[in-house]
Amino acid sequence: MKLAARVSQVSPSLTLAIAAKAKAMKAEGIDVCSFSAGEPDFDTPAHIKAAAVKALDEGKTKYGAASGEPKLREAIAHKLKTDNHLDYKAENVIVTNGGKHSLYNLIVALIEPGDEVIIPAPYWLSYPEMVTLGGGVPVIVHTDASTGYKITPEKLRETITPKTKLFVLNSPSNPTGMVYTPEEIKALAEIIVEKDILVVSDEIYEKILYDGAEHLCIGSLGKEIFDRTIVSNGFAKAYSMTGWRIGYLAGPTEIIKATITIQSHSTSNVCTFAQYGAIAALESSQDCVEEMRQAFAKRRQVMFDRLNAIPGLTCEKPDGAFYMFPDISKLGVKSLEFCDALLEKEQVAVIPGIAFGADDNIRLSYATDMATIEKGMDRLEKFVRSALGSSASRSRI
């Protein structure tokens, strides 16, 4: 059987593959400490589940509009205006099957063969694959710890060519947890306007911030940048609704109409009754979000301190999200080999940085309980100290 060529041009998700392997090991009775999955370990708040149950009881189980339930689109537009100072109406919003789907819809609607999309690395692993599937050219701009793993205005400017159509901005970042400051956002916006390109701002982690870090949506800085901004977001991270698969895209009417057309011929509407849970998430108290954020903050400090106490590892302190992205380069081994050996020898699951375009790093999620963090850090430290105690770097792992 001959498959379409596009299939061979993309790689399966390493994060999902490793998370699945860890779950399979646990199912076999193996005591695995997993830091692989990018999802909160909390249950969805009760009032959100209750709203979905109520919708089920009321018979909201039929087809809905491909663009999303009108009340949810209105609630999202209100949220964007109140929280992010973006003057969107419901017609500027499409509800999608998760945040990932919102980005895929955008790429299909916007990118033509040969169009360049600038993606700073480390990046969320699906960005380049989506661009490739859309026929575009992912242009990867490598960053490092010296700039907080963030692209600089100068680097963005020199990377833009006449073929550049879109710049991908992710703050807070997956996998690094770094947050662009308002001043950095403003500097990037000036170049985007000057060069007349578009920007998609992936803000799925916007509510998970620490130590006074501030989230500023790039589209809020004035009409010129607003007209060039598309916002991707969803309910998975802030409300622990990963399995609900509800995301959204907001932007210029022409782009949103195009994504609605695409969605109408691919998935149709998002699960109808689940959307009523999302409405409750936006319109009810946000205390549940803050409770989770505070728990993440405590775990973040513990994992950060433990990682930086391990010889051979260095780790920048993240400003947001729930990830650590330590550098393993001093160990003389690349990320995939490191992660395979760590899972095999110490039953600790982490994600190799090569999945995010950074082979000298690994990603750990601290969206898990404190006991697992402490036990997992003990095992990681044992593994690294054992590696450092060996004489030959290639054989010690």
Image (cartoon, rainbow, N blue to C red):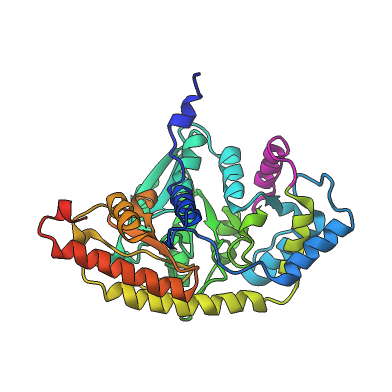
Q: Over which residues does the magenta segment extend? A: 249-269
- Decide which of 4, 91 is in the foreground and name it: 4
- Decide which of 380, 15 is in the foreground and name it: 380
The picture quadrant where one finds residue 277 is bottom right
- Decide which of 30, 186 is in the foreground and name it: 30
**Residue 25 horizontal/vertical position (percent):** 45, 53
Q: Is residue 206 rendered magenta in the image?
A: no
Measured along the vertical axis of the image, is residue 51 above or below residue 371?
Answer: above
**Residue 135 horizontal/vertical position (percent):** 49, 33
Measured along the vertical axis of the image, is residue 185 above or below residue 104?
Answer: below
- Decide which of 14, 94 is in the foreground and name it: 14
Residue 341 as seen in the image, left or right of residue 163: left
Q: Which residue lies furthest to the left in this view?
A: 391
Residue 77 visible? yes
Quarter placement of the C terminus: bottom left
Q: Is residue 268 rendered magenta in the image?
A: yes
Measured along the vertical axis of the image, is residue 99 above or below residue 305?
Answer: above
Who's the residue at 74% across and 50% down the image?
A: 271
Q: Which residue lies furthest to the front in this view?
A: 29
Residue 161 visible? no
**Residue 193 horizontal/vertical position (percent):** 50, 55
Who's the residue at 40% across and 63% down the image?
A: 364
Residue 338 as seen in the image, left or right of residue 113: left
Numbered label tally: 0
**Residue 153 horizontal/vertical position (percent):** 38, 60
